[in-house]
Image: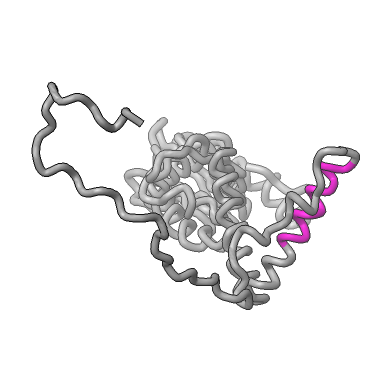
């Protein structure tokens, strides 16, 4: 157990005079684990004064219960439609061994004695919770940004709390959040195309299809002019001539030509009797 150097004179006097008789001081951010005959007896939560039975009881160790913070990346988390994502979480938690049954307090304090051990338990619980939650969420929804974080955070943090409750660890919910979600490059490209399509639709609805078409044609002409500049064979106006692609709404309808009968004489009727192969041909006599 630690003692602040700026402790009052009365506190230092008690420590010097009463310590041989079993007096101890537990600081406000620590929990003292008391052993009797080398067996767990109880825990004492500070700040408070405690008395030990000399020769029988002793303070085995103390655990810092001040809130701790970890920034953890849950890697290769599977989504419902296949792609794997990395979820960056910021988790603030606290250790409260007095909230569990007395029969479990000694075992839990031994397991959670160091800050690294407590941090590892939180990170393992966060990894499993992320795998469980994201298995029912599509990658497109998961990578939708802060809009999806509000839906995913409560589910993840509830699972983390459920897994940590047996070891007296709990999240400080208002200080925990999903920082970001790293998506695969192929998924990022698909999302960019979806966003671009939505922006194009919004632009058409706002300005009208005709104005948007004119703007796109102007951009195409500018791009083609840069591509064909200096070429004696290509003309940008020929490439962008769209008069033959479709009739304008104001162009006159196509002219309808009446059918004219053929002026040639009618052909001779076919012979009524079969042609005799022995009869000499008369058509070639002329």
Identify which residue is drawn at 70% across, 45% down: 16
Identify which residue is drawn at 25% across, 30% down: 282
State the count of labels. Answer: 0
Q: Nearer the viewer, residue 63 or 131?
A: 131
Residue 176 showing in the rendered view: no
For this orientation, the residue located farthest to the top is: 278
Q: Nearer the viewer, residue 252 or 267?
A: 267
Colour mode of the rendering: one colour
* Left or right position of 85 against 71: left
Residue 224, magenta (yes or no): yes
Q: Position of residue 29 (x, y in %)?
A: 61, 52
Q: Position of residue 265 (x, y in %)?
A: 36, 55
Which residues fall within the magenta stretch? 216-229
Is 234 located above or below residue 156 in the figure? above
Identify which residue is drawn at 16% across, 42% down: 271
Name the image quarter holding residue 263. bottom left
- Quadrant of the rendering where the N terminus is positioned: top right
Q: Position of residue 64 (x, y in %)?
A: 59, 45
Residue 64 showing in the rendered view: yes
Magenta-colored segment: predominant secondary structure = helix
* Left or right position of 234 against 197: right
For this orientation, the residue located farthest to the left is: 273
For this orientation, the residue located farthest to the front is: 286
Identify which residue is drawn at 53% across, 45% down: 32
Residue 128, magenta (yes or no): no
- Quadrant of the rendering where the C terminus is positioned: top left
Q: Position of residue 42 (x, y in %)?
A: 42, 46
Q: Nearer the viewer, residue 161 or 267?
A: 267
């Amino acid at each position: 157990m630690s003692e602040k150097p700026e402790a009052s004179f009365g506190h230092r006097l008690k420590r010097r005079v009463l310590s041989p008789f079993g007096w101890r001081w537990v600081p406000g951010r620590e929990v003292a684990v008391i052993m009797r005959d080398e067996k767990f007896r109880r825990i004492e939560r500070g700040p408070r004064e405690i008395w030990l039975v000399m020769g029988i009881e002793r303070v085995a160790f103390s655990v810092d219960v001040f809130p701790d913070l970890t920034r953890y990346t849950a890697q290769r988390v599977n989504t419902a439609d296949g792609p794997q994502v990395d979820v960056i979480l910021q988790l603030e938690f606290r250790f409260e061994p007095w909230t569990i049954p007395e029969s479990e307090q000694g075992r839990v304090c031994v397991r959670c004695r160091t800050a690294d051990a407590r941090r590892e338990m939180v990170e393992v619980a966060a990894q499993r919770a992320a795998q469980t939650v994201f298995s029912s969420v599509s990658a497109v929804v998961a990578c939708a940004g802060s809009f999806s974080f509000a839906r995913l955070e409560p589910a993840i943090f509830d699972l983390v709390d459920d897994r940590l409750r047996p070891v007296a660890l709990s999240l400080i919910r208002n200080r925990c959040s999903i920082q970001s979600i790293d998506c695969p490059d192929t998924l990022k490209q698909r999302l960019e195309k979806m966003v671009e399509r939505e922006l194009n639709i919004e632009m058409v609805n706002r300005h009208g299809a005709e104005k948007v078409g004119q703007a796109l044609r102007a951009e195409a002409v500018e791009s083609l002019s840069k591509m064909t500049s200096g070429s004696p064979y290509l003309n940008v106006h020929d490439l962008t001539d769209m008069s033959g692609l479709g009739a304008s709404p104001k162009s006159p309808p196509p002219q309808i030509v009446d059918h004219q009968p053929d002026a040639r004489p009618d052909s001779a009727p076919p012979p009524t009797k079969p042609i005799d192969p022995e009869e000499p041909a008369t058509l070639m006599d002329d």
